[in-house]
Image (cartoon, rainbow, N blue to C red):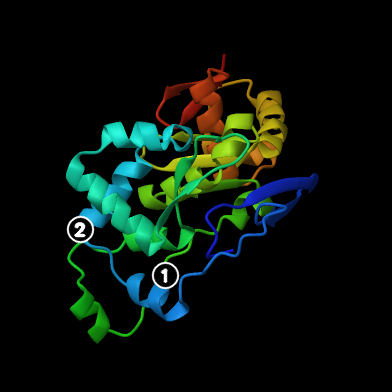
Amino acid sequence: MAGGEEIELFQLREGYYLLTVPLGQTTARSPVPAAAAKTESKILSESERALLKKLLSIKFEKRTPAYVSKALDNDEKAVLRELEQKGFVNVFKGTKYKDGVYNIRDSIYPLLSQKESETKETRGAQAPQPAVQVPFGMLHTQGFMIIADKNEARMLSERLADDMKRGNALGVKGFDGKFYIVTRDYFTRSQAAILAILKEDMNADAIATAAKLNPDGCRAVLRIMSENGDILEKRRGIFAAV
């Protein structure tokens, strides 16, 4: 699939999906040579890094060629073409995105979190460092995630764009700068448990203990409930029923 310009996702049943190249596609696509891809993926220039971050600042569903073209100046458009030629960015088309939307390859996200001062020469003199990976699977295994790094949060938001749009995942940025994300199922169960015991002003740890919830998961749900107006945060870390 790495050499393809688009992929299709089909839900087989709850929790199971089929990821494939477009069905019925007969045109052979030439994948990027492994050696070339490995060499090019070692570094992003400052202009490429800036352009990628600008793309990420645009909501995925709005990242159409027409919209992006208006948002970029001539120099940025030239950088975008270079990124497309390298295979770092491509226009994804599907049933929901008939006009196409710009998609950034997953392997590029870790490069955006690298220090701006790193260069190709200095990186070549150092021992290879493992790329930072966001444990996306944790969200579905434990039902919640709390992320402090804004780049990791952006990556997860990209992955969960459709789930969040459908309401299958919920997220909010807290006043502490952390990002709290939970699945709809975990939120529903935890919300019921919290409302059942929240009879007086309580802090997050006390609520988690009384509701028999994971402390971090409880905090994530409390943040979202407070944002939705389901409960009140009377003062920092102290919550009360509405």
For the C terminus, the image quarter is top right
Check disc 2 and report the residue beneath it: 46
193 left or right of 127 in image: right
Image location (x, y in percent) of residue 110: 39, 62
Residue type (three-letter) at the residue carrying disc 1: Ala
Residue sticking out furthest to the front: 27
Q: Where does label 1 land, which residue?
A: 131
Is the residue 25 above or below the residue 192 in the image?
A: below
Q: Which residue sits at x=45%, y=63%?
A: 107
User: Are there few (<14), some (14-19), or many (20+) residues within 10 Å of tag 2?
Assistant: few
Q: Residue at x 59, y 37 (%)?
A: 162
Which of 29/140 is in front?
29
Instruction: Check contact, mark 1 vs mark 2: CB within 8 A.
Output: no
Marks 1 and 2, the one that precedes in the sequence: 2
Q: Position of residue 148 (x, y in %)?
A: 40, 49
**Residue 127 placement: quadrant:** bottom left
- 232 w.r.t. 202: above or below: above
